[in-house]
Image (tube, grey):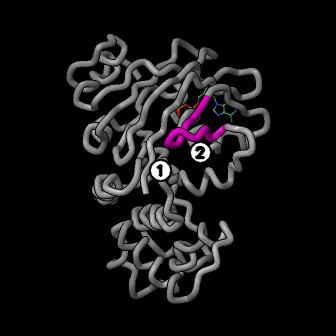
């Protein structure tokens, strides 16, 4: 259950403001791709176009194509809700439903998609998803307790379990560790490494060590100045981006000279 993403000539707008210009990128299935770059260069905006979350804002739109195993997500008649069930998302701040039990949090996306499942199937799905998120052993004795009773790192893994439960092909993560302590961050990074056996993972991160630790390929985005659009400057194997980039701007950024 893993698909590739091919983006062709994508422009991303907020109203009349062109936030990201002319991005083409090929993201392989069963790999981890990191988006890095200075604040405001459009990493999160671009990420949200990959599952049609961008257009939820009034006036927000895209030009160009995003292909999931060859099918254009922006083609006529494509239902954005279906797209979002195939391409899940994990956000910066863990956002479990606070009053809902751990079990119901895992099942929340499945229920939203109106999938009817029996109690036995639901139990199995909860266990499989929590195991997949490396959280089962920590919560198996308190599945009926509220999700808000977990630590921040556990809550983020619960959100990953919720994303996995709908059996997506791709998981997008927008700075998933920025609100976590170092130990929880390592737990989520370990998990990302395991997730790529089954899923295509795309992660936005400000932390270059994290990009170097978890990703196979890295895309460096940059912006020429305030009000200018963000652009994809370089996309390559992560080791190349960090050790032998072809663009001077990439080298300056990864060596800490700006950003
Ligand atoms: N809701 C919005 N409405 C209008 N403009 C927006 C909106 N969200 C972001 N922008 C603008 O789009 C550009 C890209 O922002 P975005 O948040 O994608 O950058 P980023 O690289 O993810 O930044 P950061 O690393 O700080 O999160 C910025 O100029 C930003 O001000």
- Residue at the extreme front of the image, as rendered: 70
Residue 70 on the magenta segment: yes
Per the model, the C-alpha gap separating discs 1 and 2 is 9 Å
Task: Answer with the quarter of the image where residue 236 lies.
Answer: top left
Residue 72 on the magenta segment: yes
In the rendered image, is residue 222 in sight?
A: yes
Residue 43 coordinates in the image, percent (x, y): 51, 32
Ligand 1: quadrant of the figure: top right
Residue 11 coordinates in the image, percent (x, y): 62, 23
Residue 178 coordinates in the image, percent (x, y): 43, 47
**In the rendered view, would you say 37 is above or below 148?**
above
Residue 175 coordinates in the image, percent (x, y): 45, 45
**Secondary structure beneath label 2:** loop
Q: Nearer the viewer, residue 41 or 235?
A: 235
Q: What segment carries the magenta color?
A: 65-74
**Secondary structure beneath label 1:** strand
Taking the spot 47% from the left edge, 78% from the top edge, the residue there is 126
Q: Main secondary structure of the magenta part?
A: strand
| Pointer 2 residue | 51
| Pointer 1 residue | 170
- Which mark identifies residue 99? none
């Amino acid at each position: 259950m893993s698909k590739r993403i091919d983006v062709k000539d994508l422009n991303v707008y907020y109203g009349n403001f062109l936030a990201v210009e002319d991005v083409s990128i090929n993201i392989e299935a069963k790999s981890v791709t990191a988006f890095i770059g200075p604040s405001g260069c459009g990493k999160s905006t671009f990420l949200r176009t990959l599952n049609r979350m961008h257009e939820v804002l009034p006036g927000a739109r895209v030009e160009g194509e995003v292909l999931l195993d060859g099918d254009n997500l922006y083609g006529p008649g494509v239902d954005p809700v279906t797209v979002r069930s195939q391409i899940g998302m994990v956000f910066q701040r863990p956002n479990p439903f606070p009053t809902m039990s751990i079990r119901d949090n895992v099942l929340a996306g499945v229920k939203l998609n109106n999938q009817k499942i029996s109690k036995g199937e639901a139990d199995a799905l909860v266990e499989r998803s929590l195991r997949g998120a490396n959280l089962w052993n920590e919560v198996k004795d308190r599945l009926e307790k509220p999700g808000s009773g977990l630590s921040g790192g556990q809550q983020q893994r619960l959100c990953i379990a919720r994303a996995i439960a709908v059996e997506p092909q791709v998981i997008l993560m927008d700075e998933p560790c920025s609100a976590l302590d170092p130990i929880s961050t390592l737990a989520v990074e370990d998990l990302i490494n395991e997730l790529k056996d089954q899923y295509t993972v795309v992660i936005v991160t400000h932390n270059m060590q994290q990009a170097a630790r978890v990703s196979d390929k890295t895309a460096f985005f940059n912006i020429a100045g305030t009000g200018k659009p963000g652009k994809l400057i370089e996309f390559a194997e992560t080791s190349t981006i960090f050790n032998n980039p072809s663009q001077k701007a990439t080298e300056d950024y990864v060596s800490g000279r700006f950003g």
